[in-house]
Amino acid sequence: MTEKSINYFNDVVMALLREKHADILEEMSFIIHGSVGLGIDDEFSDVEAIIYLPDEIWKQNGMLQINLDKCLMETNLWQQGGSIICVHPLTWMLNFKADKILSGEIDVPWSEVKIETLFNIQNDPIWYDSKDRYGKLRRMTSPENMPTLMWKKILLSKIQGFVEDGMQELNRCINRKHFLDAYIPFGNAVKALLEIGFVVCHQYYPYHKHLRWAFGRLPSPISDLILKLDSLSLVTDWQERLGIMETVFNEYKEYIISNSLLPEIDFGRVDLFDMPLHDNEFYITSNILNNSNWRAEQQAIMERTLELGLEPEASRWISWWEM
């Protein structure tokens, strides 16, 4: 964080909390969000922070929110619009699961938490947390603790999004000369390319407005791709853009293959522009990741299809209706 931000939270906000809410200070978990928390705030930034309190204490201390609102209105050093210091009950943290996770009642529900949320937990400055609630949650949700299977599923979904929602749709728009429409899948493809970089490094990524900044902090050789990605904003020829994105994707493929990050997928079958909807590598790999016995089950379904005297293509209907 910048010296400006550090001084503000130390000298203004914490001073208010010690003066008017000292009785509940020890129960607070105080977190700084956004560009201010990441230390990259500028003249366009607002300030966002959250104080978490155990639910019963939160219910009894509405004046804390009122005093913080008044303080921010009178002392805010950033954009007034969008700036807020919220007071939330602890149960709201981490998709309403934090209290159960901290108590040991449940494990981290990895599939229910957005990666952007996990990025915030790992990177937002913890300003005050004497009970170490947020600190414990940070340790429990560190990237090293996310199951390998989850990383594989996320990586597959990002690659699939890049190909199907990005490159395939973009190519159709360009071929039809629908150039205004083309910017929509182009944006999807660029966002997916950035996010893939984090996932192959087994790191969480931030919300889109901080993606480029955080990408530059990834380890080499992934972070080295930022120069090629930056060039996408400089060129105006659509074919040149497609070429750059395909080059970056191919470098990702080499990295994924050489590090065995997703051995279940056959990259020789991944076509950036033309893949059948039901019979493609994404469909197959997704099923394998969800069910290790999938191939054997599919073989049994195929045998049943042939027994019924049907063509192999009918096997998916046999599966759907469990015939």
Image: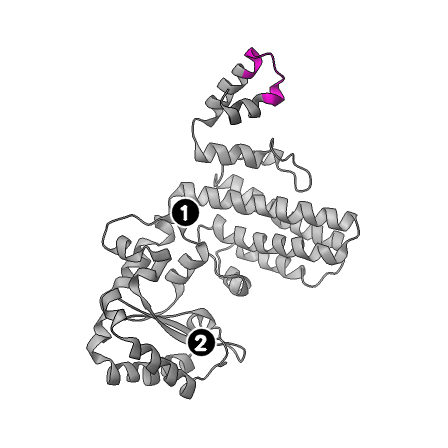
Question: Residue at the spot x=50%, y=76% of the render?
Answer: 45
Instruction: State the image coordinates of residue 306 (x, y, percent, origin top left).
Output: 57, 13
Q: Residue furthest right?
A: 177
Q: What residue would you read off at disc 2?
A: 47
Query: Which span is picked out in magenta?
Result: 305-314
Query: How many neighbours does mark 1 have within 10 angstroms: few (below 14), some (14-19), or many (20 or more)?
Result: few
Q: What is the CA distance from the residue labelled 2 to the residue labelled 1?
A: 29 Å
Instruction: State the image coordinates of residue 195 (x, y, percent, origin top left).
Output: 53, 54
Question: Residue at the spot x=56%, y=57% of the render?
Answer: 224
Q: What residue would you read off at disc 1?
A: 111
Q: Evaluate whether residue 161 shows in this view.
A: yes
* Nearest to N terminus: mark 2 or mark 1: 2
Q: Is residue 286 above or below residue 135?
A: above
Q: Tag count in the figure?
A: 2
Instruction: State the image coordinates of residue 287 (x, y, percent, origin top left).
Output: 49, 33
Q: Nearer the viewer, residue 291 or 194?
A: 291
Instruction: State the image coordinates of residue 97 (x, y, percent, origin top left).
Output: 32, 54
Q: Residue furthest bottom?
A: 74
Query: How many neighbours does mark 2 have within 10 angstroms: few (below 14), some (14-19), or many (20 or more)?
Result: many
Secondary structure category for the residue under label 2: loop
Numbered tag placed on residue 44 in the rendering: none
At label 2, which amino acid type do we have?
Val
Q: Evaluate whether residue 204 shows in this view.
A: no
Question: Residue at the spot x=29%, y=63% of the render?
Answer: 90
Q: Nearer the viewer, residue 66 or 150?
A: 66
Q: Is residue 192 above or below residue 207?
A: above
Q: Quadrant of residue 96?
A: bottom left
Q: Is residue 26 above or below residue 75?
A: above
Q: Report the magenta stretch's main SS.
A: helix
At label 1, which amino acid type do we have?
Ser
